[in-house]
Amino acid sequence: MRIITGSARGCRLKTPKGQATRPTSDRIKESLFNILGSKVYGRKVLDIFAGTGNLGLEALSRGAASACFVDQATAALIRENAVHTRLQDRATVHGGDVFAQLARFEQGGASFNLIFCDPPYHKGLFERALTFFDESAVLAHDGILVVEHGADENTMPELAKLSCVLNRRYGHTTQLSFFQRKAYLEEEDI
C-alpha cells in the first residue's frame, strides 16, 4: 500500500501486523480520488475507522488542508505513517471508540467537509455512522461523505438530510457510496 500521487507520492505505508485488516486497495483508492478530483484540495478531512490512515494521508498528499484520523486499534501506526509521509504537521490522530470521538467532535462544534468512513464490513457500523452524520453537523453543509462497505451491504438506513449521489461497485467485495446534504444539493441546482 502506497500514496499514489501528490507531495508524498510513492511512500509506502506500514500496515498492522497480525490483525485481520482489509485496507482499501490502490485500485479502489485511485478510483475514489479520481471521482473526487479537485474537491480534495483545501478540505478539512475526517478519516474514521482509519486503519493505516491510507485515505486521509492520500488526501493530505493531494492538498487537503488538514486531516483528523480516528481508529481504536491503530492510532500509533497512523502517527508513524504520517511521520513517514512527512504529513504529520497537518494530521491529528485520535485513538479510542470512533462513535465516542464523533460525539466529542459534535459537542465541540467541529465539522469536516470531506469524511472517509471505512469500517469493518457486516457489523452494522457504516449504517450507524450514516445515521450519525445524517443527524449531526460534523459533516459540513457542503461536505462529502464517502463510505466504503461490502458489495452485499445494500440496505441503507432511512436518511432525512443526506442523499446518496453516487455508488460504485468494485468486484464482489467492495462498494463506495458518496453522500451529500440534500439542502446543499438543492442550492446547487438553483
Image (cartoon, helix red, strand yellow):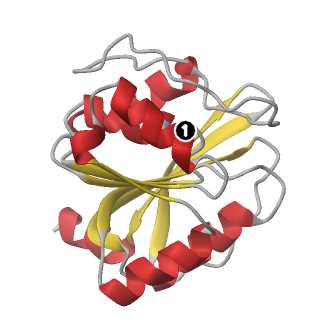
Q: As shown in the figure, which amino acid type bears the numbered disc 1? A: Leu
Q: In the displayed image of the protein, which residue is found farthest to the bottom?
A: 107
Q: Position of residue 181 (x, y in %)?
A: 37, 71
Q: Mark 1 points at which residue?
A: 77
Asked if residue 178 can be seen in this view, the reply is yes
Up the image or down, 77 lies above or below 178; here it is above
Residue lying farthest top? 10
All told, the count of numbered labels is 1
| Residue at 68% across, 32% down | 16
Q: Residue 77, image x and y in percent?
A: 55, 38
Position in image of residue 174 (x %, y %): 71, 36
In which quarter of the view is residue 25 placed?
top right
Q: Is residue 37 left or right of residue 179?
A: left
Split into 4 quadrants, where in the image is the N terminus? top right
Q: Residue at x 29, y 20 (%)?
A: 8
Q: Residues within 10 Å of mark 1 (few under 14, many from 20)?
A: some
What residue is rendered at 48% in x and 66% in y? 163
Closer to us: 64 or 15:
15
- Residue 81 image-quadrant placement: top left
Mark 1, secondary structure of its residue = helix
Task: Give above or below for 42 relative to 133.
Answer: above
Q: Where is residue 168 in the image (x, y as percent from the top left)?
A: 58, 37
The quadrant where residue 99 appears: bottom right
Which residue is rendered at x = 32% and y = 85% of the image? Answer: 108
